[in-house]
Amino acid sequence: MTDHTASSIPTVTRRPKSHAWWNAVNAWLLLLPAAVLLIAFTHYPILATIRHSFFLTRRNGTEVFVGLDSYQAMAADPIFWKALVNNFWFALGTIPTSIALALLMAIWVNRNMRGRGFLRLAFFTPTVLPMIAVANIWLFFYTPDYGLLDQLRGAFGLAGWNWLGDPSTVMGCLIVMVIWKEAGFFMIFYLAALQQLSPDLEEAASVEGASRWYTFRRITFPLLMPTTLFVAINAVINSFKLVDHLVIMTKGGPNNASTLLLYYIYEVAFTFQDSAYAATLTVVLLVLLSTVALVKFGYLDRRIHYQ
């Protein structure tokens, strides 16, 4: 009898170590361009900013180590706290509203109806407009006496109003403008996510007698949570990087009622020429955004179902 036992055992071929080493080197070489750009334009500026916040630059260009003096001055700066509170209310006013409006628009234009392409274009158009153009458009709306809002008020016999010059209305005016610009951009992500959902889920819920609201609340919206998280992170970042509109429309006024944190950094760095204090304020902004990123990756990602 012929012994087939030895011949039936599969032969395991081991890759030489040199081949595995070359694969690792090849992978790092492919990542090298992106890594260089990330280090040069993200990590290095962050570390340089943190270092600069502990120094004071004299007029002759020399640096003097001052430790935490800039942070102590920031803690006693009322304009910093005003800008921080303004940014909180600005984020609270723009983020939930723009996300909810984007979701409603996406559901609307996802339906099979006439004029769907025109509606999508109309909702997305504000997104592609330059920020300076958007600021000038809304300046026409808010200009006292002959702006569009005051013309509408005049039709009802009401007097003109200085919308951007009144501390009680200036922040609301900025919030409305930003929602108008951002909602169409977020709508695109929701529309793409809705088109990836299987229609069988909605049909099965309809067969079971579920209402549209119940289907949306129990099926559609939970499946859209990854998109909602992505959109929310972008909305948070956008709420902390508004500068262009403030330069054109309010310059932080009246009486710092519309000063946001990044605009205050811009003003300190380029108007007051205090780069060390601007670096200190930037560190605070980095800490805030890093906290949002840690919450996103460390907590929310684990509680969201990805298909």
Image: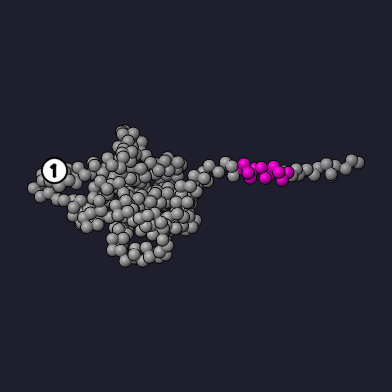
Do we see residue 210 in this rendering?
no
- Residue at the spot 36% in from the left edge and 36% down from the top edge: 112
Mark 1 secondary-structure assignment: loop
Q: Is residue 66 left or right of residue 146?
A: right
Q: Position of residue 293 (x, y in %)?
A: 44, 55
Q: Position of residue 35 (x, y in %)?
A: 52, 46
The correct choice, above or below, for 229 with respect to 72 in the image is above
Q: Is residue 28 left or right of residue 241?
A: right
The correct choice, above or below, for 21 with respect to 113 in the image is below
Magenta stretch, residue numbers: 16-27
- Residue at the spot 42% in from the left edge and 41% down from the top edge: 192
Q: Nearer the viewer, residue 59 or 99?
A: 59
* Number of other residues with Cα within 10 Å of mark 1, as a class: few under 14, some 14 to 19, many 20 or more: some
Going by the numbered disc 1, the residue's amino acid type is Tyr
Q: Is residue 149 left or right of residue 239?
A: left
Q: Quadrant of residue 125?
A: top left
Q: Position of residue 236 (x, y in %)?
A: 37, 52
The correct choice, above or below, for 105 with respect to 61 in the image is above
Q: Which residue is mark 1?
A: 146
- Residue at the spot 35% in from the left edge and 50% down from the top edge: 241
Quadrant location, the N terminus: top right
